[in-house]
Amino acid sequence: MTTKADMALIALLRENARASTATLARRLGVSRTTVQSRIDRLEKRGIITGYTVKLSSEHESHLVRAHVLVTALPKFAPKVEIGLKPMMAVRSVHSISGNFDMIVIVEAPSIGELDSVLDQIGALEGVERTMSSIILSTRIER
C-alpha cells in the first residue's frame, strides 16, 4: 500500500528525479534518512523502477509530436508492438479500448521526419489502419 507520504515523495521526484535527499527532506518536512528509506522501500517494492530525463520546453518546442491511433488485424497486436519497439521516434505505446487497439506517441524533429515515421507505422505487418493527430501544445503535464 502506498501512503500519502510516499505519494508526496513520488510527486516531488516526478518534478525533479535528480533532487537531493536533503532538498526532498526539506520540502517534505522530514529527515534525509526518512527520505532515503522511503526511496529504497519504493524501489524494492517495484513502485519506482527507474529515473528519467525531462527535456526543457525550449528543446521540446522544436519537436513535432503526434498521437497515432492504430488498429491492428486480429491477433497481430503483439507483432505490431514488436515492430514499434525499435523505432526511436516512438515514445510510448498504450493499449486502449474502443475502435482502435493502441495509441502510439511519437516525436520527430520535423514534419517530414514525422511523416516518414507515420509511413513506417502504417507499413508494419498487422497494421490495418492509423489515424494521427499532431500535438499543437501541451496545456498540463505532470
Image: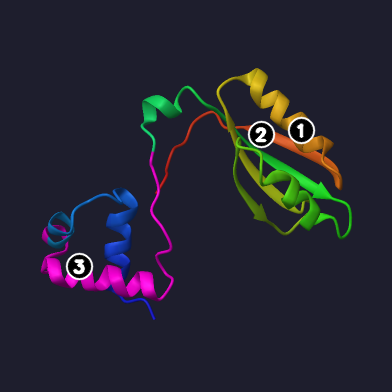
Q: Which mark is residue 133?
A: 2
The magenta span reads 26-54
Looking at the picture, does residue 115 appear above or below residue 4? above
Label 3 sits on a secondary structure element that is helix
Label 1 sits on a secondary structure element that is helix
Task: Determine if residue 5 is in view.
Answer: no
- Badge 1 local density, few (<14 within 10 Å), some, or many (20+)? few
Q: Quadrant of the N terminus?
A: bottom left
Position in image of residue 66 (x %, y %): 62, 34
Amino acid carrying mark 2 in the image = Ser
Residue designated by label 1? 120
Residue designated by label 3? 35
Q: Earlier in the sequence, mark 1 or mark 3?
A: 3
At 27% from the left and 49% from the top, the residue drawn is 18
Residue 95 falls left or right of residue 5: right
Where, by quadrant of the figure, is residue 120 drawn?
Answer: top right
- Badge 3 local density, few (<14 within 10 Å), some, or many (20+)? many
Position in image of residue 75 (x %, y %): 86, 60
At 41% from the left and 58% from the top, the residue drawn is 50
At 43% from the left and 63% from the top, the residue drawn is 49
Position in image of residue 22 (x %, y %): 12, 58
Amino acid carrying mark 1 in the image = Gln
Residue 32 falls left or right of residue 75: left
Is residue 140 or residue 95 the one in the foreground? 95
Discs 2/3, front: 3
